[in-house]
Amino acid sequence: MSKWVLLGLRTGAKTTLYPGSAETAPGVSPGRPKGRLSGEPESERSMLSLCPTGAIYQSEDRISVDYRRCVHSFRCMRGPSEPLDYEWGYEWASIRPEENDLSGRLGKAFTHSIHIRVLDAGACRACLSEIEQLGKPYYNVHRLGIFMTPTPRQADVLLVAGPVTDNMRLPLQKAYNAMPTPKKVIAVGTCALSGGVFGPSFTCGAGVANVIPVDVEVTGCPPPPLALIHGLLLAAGRRARTLTEPVRPLQGRTTE
Amino acid sequence: MQAPSNHAIKPHSLMELLESRWAGGVSVRADIQKPLLLIECGPGELQEVCGLLVSHAKYTFATLVVQENSSHWLLRYIFYGDLGCGQVHVLVHQPKVGRVIPSISAHVHAADWHEREVEDLFGLTFEGHPRLGDFVLHEKWPEGVNPMRSGFDASVPYSRREVDPEWRPLQILQAPGAFMMPVGPVYSDYAESAQFFLETVGEDVVRTTPRFFYKYRGIEKLAEGQPIERVLLMAERFSGTSAFAHSLAFCQAVEQICGVRLPVRAEALRVLLAELERLRQHVSAIAGICGSTALAVATSQASILEEELLRLSCDVAGHRYLFGLNIPGGLSLDLSAEECLRLSESIKQIVERLNALLEMLRFSSSFLDRIEEVGIVPAQRAVSYGLVGPIARASGVSRDLRKVLPYGHYNVPLEFNIPAEFDGDGYARLRVLFSEAKEAANIIRQLASAIPSGEIICPPFEIVPGEALGWVEAPLGAAFHWLNIGEDGRVARYRVTPPSFTNWHGFHLAAEDFAFQDFPIIMATFGLSNAESDR
């Protein structure tokens, strides 16, 4: 077995320095479109129609992006003559707008070590795969005192991905109810925030918030691991809230 | 263990055979160009025709497509053979008043789950099928509500039902000391939602009853009446870890219907990206297998490579899971020569480290003890279940769609091998994953230096009505996307048969007769996706 130990030592530390300092390695995030001041009404209308999930919308004199709907189709970037600019960050998590202050809301215990139960409510597996990376060498959230637990009874935080399919609604409620209070829910990815391309429909809801209360939203399709770390730190009250675009209320599905 | 002789009969001999056997009773048409054989028969001949295709002609069952027309049901059973055999479609028309079709699953076991699915979603009954009901739709969907029927409104939640948390399989083992252990739907650290009922009388699992479709999103129904661009999103996102493969199959179906020829650069880049996805998926599966045996350093090593491949994908193609690249007619993004070179260089290095990892795993006896001669799928069962992908190839069944039904740039001379192992155990599946990862890297490196110049997308084209089958060898195996575009240019019927669906059907073969503690390891060596299977 010593050869494995040696190999491990030889490989050295790969872990990102985030949140101590910014991660700059290429490929850690696909980026996301950025709102801008409206230009020609004609071209902006076509820009709005390019977005398949209605994430891009007009608000007063601006073109804004609702990241809870953005599915990274890149159609606003690769199609039009005047594409939207992309920003290449990953601090995409935010606290639910109605609860403005999260610092210390869970009590002091949560600012130290937290245990997470991951729940798949019909995710496409990309979100789950990104969550899985959290425990792997490049991200290794154990160093931040964050651990995965197989049972909701030991969990402080429920990390939910997927639009909540019909068959997962009851298991989701049961898992949430089984968690001891105080507890927090992080909704991960576009499906969990708005239903994505699947909901609402005969099989899916329009996101987790319709079933259980959500405290932190992590946008992205899927959110890269660094965005998930950002969300976890927010939930633990360990990182200042990021300013994001104003969030538009969700109303039904926009088809085409 | 040797693979049985499984060479498929060539289409012309098959035609002769069918005509001599059922003179006049069965009509056979051939499209030699594709090649495609269309067999029309009545419900009376269906079982025998399908049985002959599989047992005598050695074809593999691909999928069952049911289409509801105004006056009749059209059932299309699709089969494929070896190189040059093309596809065989068996068509049965059934007047809508009748809802009973003879079941073929006694002759073609691979059709078992397809018939169960159709029974649930369309309300058709397959006469002679031993186990219909409670498959896709869980227990409390009212009888007679069949979401795939044309009158069903898919846009609103269907809530007139309750889930029964106490659901149990119909038959439970009755023996002294027997007990049943339910696993799931929420279990393990990162596992996808699915449920397994494991029955045992002590140490060994005697029977495994899986219960899936917890993640059923009904994309086949959601696609109906939607424009192509919208359905493309669903094709890409129902299984995020094989997004490129499935969006490719969907695009190929659209392109076939519209008669579009792709620029050769687009074809080559598609293969390049598809192999990048395969490589990443296989490395991820290898990490999963190492993780299931708690070999920590090996898990970390494979995970490091996985993350590097994700970053590489994002770096050259804009998205870690290759979303948003395939569009009907080509690709949305070009790769520069410099990017191709960088890709090829990085892949070369990753494969070297992968080889080193395999060399160490091969001599780690504690690891081998957990996967060798564990979870065995015998070759005959792999054939009768129509298993696909790395799992089938580990049992000596090596029908890879890239070789037997070459599509796109796989038609040009590319040098790659389809690995074949014959042990059918967990270790054989691991070795297949390693060899396929190497072959994928090999293809990437061949292509990266020789991408033909030109456009990455064909000129804009009109969406025309029609129907076609798109297929790819996805990372987990053969995937079939049947697409029917209606007169309005929107999707009339969309049918997806992902490899995970096909292979989960055969999962119990591996899990049964092995000890309880082997179960998670066997599951890891299968490496299947419920998102892909449940759709």
Image (cartoon, rainbow, N blue to C red):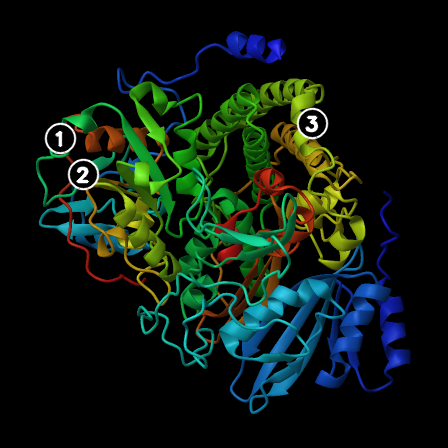
- Residue depicted at x 33% and y 69%: B155
- Residue A89 visible in this rendered orientation of the protein: no
Outermost residue, bottom side: B97
Helix, strand or loop at disc 3? helix
Could you tell me the amino acid type at mark 1? Gly
Reply above or below: B1 against B169.
Answer: above
According to the image, label 2 marks what residue? Answer: A182
The mark found on residue B342 in the picture is none
* Residue A2, picture quadrant: top right
- Residue depicted at x 41% and y 27%: A135
Helix, strand or loop at disc 2? loop
* Residue B298, picture quadrant: top right
Residue A237 appears left or right of B131: left
Q: Position of residue A181 (x, y in %)?
A: 20, 40
Reply above or below: B464 against B214.
Answer: below
Helix, strand or loop at disc 1? loop
The mark found on residue A107 in the picture is 1
Callout 2–callout 1 Cβ contact below 8 Å: yes
Are there few (<14), some (14-19), or many (20+) residues within 10 Å of tag 1? Answer: few
The mark found on residue B368 in the picture is 3
Q: Position of residue A52 (x, y in %)?
A: 33, 55
Q: Is disc 3 in the same subunit as disc 2? A: no
Could you tell me the amino acid type at mark 2? Pro
Could you tell me the amino acid type at mark 3? Leu
